Image (cartoon, rainbow, N blue to C red):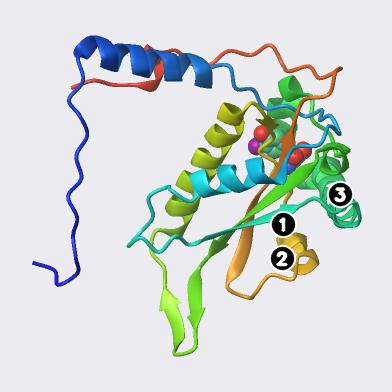
Amino acid sequence: MSSHPFISHTRPILSDAQLLENSKVFYEEMDTRRTVRHFSTQPVPKAVIENIIQTASTAPSGAHKQPWTFAVISSPEMKRKIRIAAEKEEQENYQGRMSDEWIRDLEPLGTDENKPFLEDAPYLIAVFKKAYNIHPEGKQKNYYVNESVGLAAGFLIAAIHQAGLCSLTHTPSPMNFLEKILERPKNERAVLLLPVGYPSEEAVVPDIQRRPLEDVSVWY
Ligand code: IYR
């Protein structure tokens, strides 16, 4: 038995009807989430973003190392710098680095190299993974870093939606310009950049469907 302290943890046993209701309400709420690419400049209170990030940070992680940093950008100068750097990379992506198949697969999403949302959205959240932690005694290893940060990003996107806001899971590639602009320490690598806010009045989303349960699950 570990010498570390443990505390008891229980959850009340609910009726099947209550479980069904809870899971259905949450599913239906999450099913209204859409990735948007047109953001309003409408401000959002900083405390909302703080709560969202705290929710993301409740995600499970390898050996509870929580190997993530969420960098929040609201300064117009910083957003501008990020937009310029992201568009520079995306121009190269769309003009040759991406395969013809990839460009074709993106057609229904209506994306291109112009990223005005990087300046319009009131907040950008850059998600960084920490390959290791830096301690005075030296490097401390993290485990399942990609999986852990992916889980936290999922929690983040769900929390943004639940709050009543929208996000875009933006992955400019390569993303190392974020480490430079934001002056992150050398153990951090950028993995995602999420504009967060309200959709603009003209925002539209592609008319695409989610795969049905039979298609995404197998039961034994
Ligand atoms: N990073 C580019 C291309 C892009 C790639 C995928 I996969 C998408 O789902 C959407 C876009 C861009 O942001 O435009």
Marks 1, 2: nearer the viewer:
2
How far apart are the alpha carbons under marks 1 and 2?
Answer: 8 Å
Which one is closest to the eye, mark 3 or mark 1?
3
Image coordinates for residue 83, horizontal then vertical, percent: 86, 49
Tags 1 and 2 in contact by the CB under 8 Å rule? yes
Q: Residue at x 19, y 55 (%)?
A: 7
Residue 24 can be seen, yes or no: yes
Residue located farthest toward the bottom when viewing the structure as drawn: 137
Vertical comparison of 61 with 42: above or below: below
Give the CA distance from mark 2 to mark 3.
14 Å
Q: Secondary structure at mark 1?
A: loop
Residue type at the position of mark 2: Glu
Relative horizontal placement of residue 5, taking residue 98 as reference (left or right): left
- Mark 2 = which residue? 179
Residue at position x 56%, y 28% in the image:
162
User: Circle 1 sits on which residue?
Assistant: 175
The residue sitting at 77% across, 25% down in the picture is 199
Q: Which residue is mark 3?
A: 83
- Expressed as whole percent of the image width and height from the top left, the position of residue 141 reads 41, 74
Above or below for 143 versus 167:
below
Q: Earlier in the sequence, mark 3 or mark 1?
A: 3
> Dot 2 surroundings within 10 Å: few (below 14), some, or many (20 or more)?
some
Q: Return the disc, 2 or 3, that comes first in the chain's sequence.
A: 3
Residue in front for this viewpoint, 216 or 41: 41
Residue 57, image x and y in percent? 48, 51
Amino acid at dot 1: Met
Q: Residues within 10 Å of mark 1 (few under 14, many from 20)?
A: some
Residue at the limit of the structure toward the left, as seen here = 1
Residue 98 shows up from this direction: no
Residue 1, image x, y percentages: 8, 67
User: Quadrant of residue 3 in the image?
Assistant: bottom left
Quadrant location, the C terminus: top left
